[in-house]
Image (tube, rainbow, N blue to C red):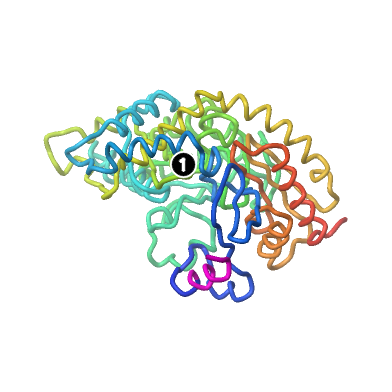
Amino acid sequence: MDNRDLVARSLAAVWHPCTQMKAHERLPLVPVARGEGAWLEDFDGRRFVDGVSSWWVNLFGHANPAINAALADQLGRLEHAMLAGFTHEPVVALSERLARLAPGRLGHAFYASDGASATEIALKMAFHHWANRGHPEKNRFVHLEGAYHGETVGALSVTDVPVFRDTYVPLLRRNLVTPFPARHAGSKEFQCEACADEAAGALAKLLEAQGDTVAALIVEPLVQGASGMRMYHPRYLALARELCDRHGVLLIADEIMTGFGRTGTMFACEQAGVAPDLLCLSKGITGGYLPLSCVLATDEVYASFYDDSVARGFLHSHSYTGNALACRAALAVLDLFEEGRVIEANRGKAARFDAIAAPLARHPAVREWRRLGMIWAFEVAGAGAGFAARAFEIAMREGALLRPIGDAVYFMPPYVTDEEAFAVLVRAGTAIADELGACA
């Protein structure tokens, strides 16, 4: 097997995601032969740092020995069994541990395979909860400007990223949009407390006028990923929680990206001191090994479905719900968090990485440098059309896998990344700023 052969076969047989396939006439696919730790390698032996954790899923590196061993053990016991009417030890153990870790009292776990499916589950669950309680009129949802919650039809109805949403508008249910906590739509004033107050005021007016028809507010806590790593002050979450309680609206926290330590705490909601009614998890839950997602629900939401009537039950289902292998991978991930005291260790690591990145943060073409937990992001002045694709090529040349979003370059590496590998990311970011930036 070599790079050229695999790329040709892939272009002939695979429809790649989030891609205009014709673009690969100019920008070749990157073949991956193997991975180890924070590094990926092609068939020619060229290595590059996985600076985006393979779309934000990889926490503890590729080919992690502990996760490998857990999966090998589980393969000899049970690979999968249907979860409707049956159960198994990995799904029970994972549900118990997630309930102990999650903020508040989120005592029941419902499983699927990917983040968008978790969003669909949470939306349906919120609507059905109110219908079971005699309020079917509460069937709309509120989401933030710039929100991204997935690309299935329900998830797109609470997504506000034009490139993903606009084509499919005729298929989507109309929901309600509330301002992102910033001075104005294009503002990059991150962590602004006054902006949190102003946006919460707008949310208060919306719920006062239409709260009787709203089932839930859905938010990405602290960071909007697909909108360019836009970060906001935890105060907004605290105020939103109060407003939801006041107006009888559920709060859905989409921690599909922000969960499992990315923002510096196990779950981003912790930084606001709030607990949601429904918590969506995926991506890092299995350390990037297997598809798995989960919605954790409060006892109150669960109780509204508990009845003799089948129609009052939550009949949503997926064939691979609660897959035993995926749950075992997730349990191994939680073991690694506990054994390595990862949240605490990452704080020290992030501070060391900040020092390595300091020259890039001061680069004359770099704008809006920001960090939250293990996420770093910045814009490049004068980026121009085609910036993301050109920046990707520059980064690959420097030995780093980066995937800019619009004009935003970000680093979200696995937690096993060391100073040497992070320096490669900084070098790539510097080359992008040097070559594509307009220094003012």
Main SS, magenta residues: helix
Kindly give the residue lying farthest to the right in the view shown: 440
Q: Quadrant of residue 202?
A: top right
Is 63 on the left or on the right of 408, as rendered?
Answer: left
Is 431 on the left or on the right of 4, as rendered?
Answer: right
Whether residue 8 appears in magenta in the rendering, the answer is yes
Kindly give the residue lying farthest to the front in the view shown: 1
Q: Which of 42 and 119 is in front in this view?
A: 42
| Kind of residue at badge 1 | Asp
Image x and y of residue 288, in percent? 48, 44
Give me the residue at 57% from left, 27% from top.
342
Give me the residue at 61% from left, 69% from top.
28
Give me the residue at 74% from left, 52% from top.
428
Secondary structure category for the residue under label 1: strand
Q: Which of 200 and 55 is in front in this view?
A: 55
Whether residue 65 appears in magenta in the rendering, the answer is no
Q: Nearer the viewer, residue 382 or 304?
A: 382
| Magenta-highlighted residues | 1-10
Kindly give the residue lying farthest to the left in the view shown: 308
Figure check: 415 above or below 433: above
- Callout 1 environment at 10 Å: few (<14), some (14 to 19), or many (20+)? many
Give me the residue at 72% from left, 30% from top.
351
Q: Which of 69 and 394 is in front in this view?
A: 69
Image x and y of residue 249, in percent? 39, 37
**In the rendered picture of this protein, how many numbered marks are placed on residues?**
1
Residue under label 1, please give it.
Answer: 254
Figure check: 319 above or below 23: above
Which quarter of the image is occupied by the C terminus? bottom right
Image x and y of residue 41, in percent? 60, 54
Image x and y of residue 142, in percent? 45, 46
